[in-house]
Image: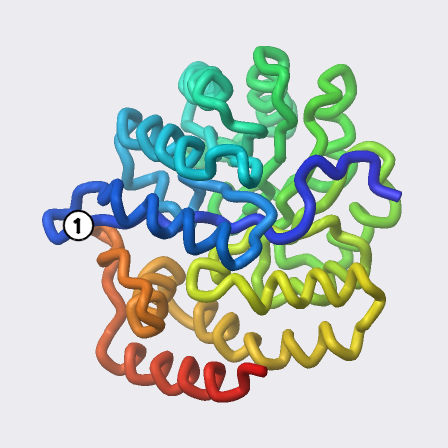
Amino acid sequence: MPQHTEFAGVLAAVATPFDAAGEVDEQRLRSLVDDLVGEGVHGLVPVGSTGEFASLTGAERRLLVEVVVDQAAGRVPVVAHTGAMTSKEAVELSRHAEQAGASGLLLLPPYKDRLSIEETTTYFRSVADTTALPVVVYNLPLATGVNLTPEDVVGMAEGSPNIAYVKDTSGDWHQLTRSIHDYSDVYSTLIGWDTMYLGALVEGAVGCILGATNVTAKPFVAVYEAVQAGDLAAAQAEWNRVYPVVRFLLGGGYVGGLKGAMDAFGKSIGDPRSPLAAMSPERRSEISTILKEFAATAS
């Protein structure tokens, strides 16, 4: 059994709304938080890669965490992404998130320079040792250039027991299953690769952190609940419904596709911040068709 379950189930990687001028739209963010909580998510993860953290100023990152914590109002935990290019900034953002009322921290390693595992471990421990909050290691090798193996994470957790989770966005099924089966007594696994969601839950992941939930969270919650109840047929049926949406999002620019899909589904939160591009008209037509088919199969 996993040792750490404070964060389990469907954690939504919250997208960041922007207005027509490209500024953070606080009111639409509050509405999005309410929508996600209303659809049954078990947690919120603002200012991550789905939330376009790399396009935000430090002040904007702090504001987004404050707004999400305030609007969540204790209904679900908030795990704030506080990863940065330096340990100093990551520590500062993490302290702010803790003071703002976040329940946990998600940390992406610096990606400007490829770090050694020793440097990466120093980075994670520098944050973990200055906070009482649980830390989720964000393994995203496509962005950072460094794949964190299960053994690497175990090494980080030695002496820093609040390093308690991994968000696995490696896309490596073998590595994922090793984390779940061999090291769940040290850390718990949250799947971050959208198309691997159902398989990861069945294998034993405690939950997910996914951006696709912004479009519609209900099917992801239904899949999780069915797996927990041991009804794999129901889980597969619900996953089959939403999978075309998930597959579409991974078929192009993720954030642009996500925001375009949200708009097509009646949840407009504006375009990505430049230089990320908005969805093309051709992709918009494709996702509109997919979403119509998805809605038509609702029970």
Quarter the N terminus occupies = top right
Q: Position of residue 116 (x, y in %)?
A: 59, 29
- Image quadrant where residue 260 sits: bottom left
Using the image, determine if residue 201 lies above or below residue 155: below
The one nearer the camera, 70 or 11, is: 70
The one nearer the camera, 153 or 256, is: 256
- Image quadrant where residue 118 sits: top right
Residue 177 as seen in the image, left or right of residue 81: right
Q: Position of residue 267 (x, y in %)?
A: 32, 63
Using the image, determine if residue 209 lies above or below residue 126: below
Residue at 46% over, 88% down: 293
Residue at 34% over, 82% down: 288
Q: Looking at the picture, which amino acid does disc 1 mark?
A: Asp
- Image quadrant where residue 55 sits: top left
Q: Residue furthest top?
A: 130
Residue 26 as seen in the image, left or right of residue 200: left
Residue 269 as seen in the image, left or right of residue 67: left
Q: Does the image show residue 169?
A: no
Badge 1: few (under 14), some or many (20 or more) residues near its Cα, within 10 Å? some
In what element is the residue under mark 1?
loop
Colour convention: rainbow
Using the image, determine if residue 233 lies above or below residue 67: below
Q: Write down the residue under mark 1.
A: 19
